Amino acid sequence: MGSTKELPPLCLDALREVGNIGIGNAATALAGLLGTRVSVTVPSALFSPLEDVLAGVGGLEEPVAGVHLRIDGDIKGTVLYLFNRESAFYLIDMLLGRPRGTTRELDALGRSVIAEAGNILTGAFVSAIAGMTGFKILPAVPMFAFDMLGAVITASFAASGCDDLVLLIETDFVQEAERVKGHFIMLLQPGYLETILAALGIAL
């Protein structure tokens, strides 16, 4: 496990900027799927111990759907993009052009929609990090996940051997009057947070 030291505001500002660029790229890609404009905001970005992130997203037993992506190369870890069940249903309706509230369960079509959106989102974040740092990042095949939040995060954490400081970026996707909240989570193996910040010109 790594340290749970607090990061200076400058570090969070830099990481939030990475998030803004990544989410902007994702919004462009999603707009292509929707055939209409999608606006995106990043209300918050923070590094917290894993247990605090779990509480912030909704708790261990919160059902979530999304994508899990292992990354290798110049940095190593796992990235996830997760929606709670209600947001996942809203996103499916948004992407399929249905009235909000139509989707009431996660069927095969819904899983496919969430998986595709999650692939776009995680890919956009990884590309943003690579673009800003110059790192070569090798993503594995994205994996769809639908389970309780605790199970998804704990499995990712255990499999990756990651540090106990987790990056959590909250995102809001807005299309006309509809809003969908999601959470981007990055778990890095020990030492790679410092590697990213050094590439951004920030020393801890």
Image (cartoon, rainbow, N blue to C red):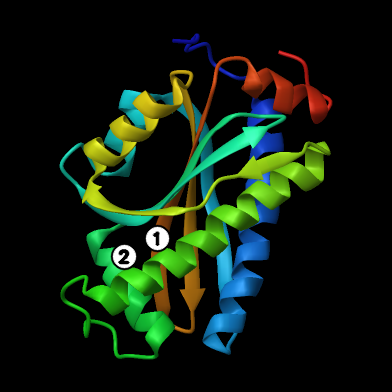
Q: Camera-side residue: 14 or 43?
A: 14
Q: Residue at x 66, y 62 (%)?
A: 24
| Amino acid at circle 2 | Ser
Q: Give percent across and percent down for residue 86.
A: 24, 65
Label 1 residue SS: strand
Kindly state the secondary structure of the residue where label 2 is placed.
Answer: helix
Name the image quarter holding the N terminus. Answer: top left
Residue at 83% from the left image edge and 39% from the top image edge: 134
Residue 88 visible in the shown view: yes
Residue 17 appears anywhere in the view: no
User: Could you tell me residue 33's position as x and y percent?
Assistant: 55, 82
* Label 2 sits on residue: 87
Q: Quadrant of the C terminus?
A: top right
Q: Residue at x 28, y 83 (%)?
A: 100
153 up-or-down from 98: above or below: above
Front residue of 97 and 191: 191
Residue under pointer 1: 181
Side of 72 where 130 appears, left or right: right
Residue 145 on image: x %, y %: 32, 52
**Number of dots carrying numbers:** 2
In the displayed structure, would residue 195 be above or below residue 79?
Answer: above
Q: Which disc is residue 9 wearing?
A: none
Tell me where residue 84 sits by quadrant.
bottom left
Residue 108 occupies which quadrant of the picture? bottom left
Q: Is residue 31 left or right of residue 118?
A: right
**Alpha carbon distance from label 2 to label 1:** 6 Å
- Report crowding for label 2: few under 14, some 14 to 19, many 20 or more residues within 10 A (C-alpha): some
- Give yes or no for contact between labels 2 and 1 (Cβ–Cβ under 8 Å): yes
Question: What x and y, as percent, mark residue 30?
Answer: 56, 74
What type is the residue that disc 1 sits on?
Answer: Lys
Q: Who is closer to the viewer here, 179 or 119?
A: 119
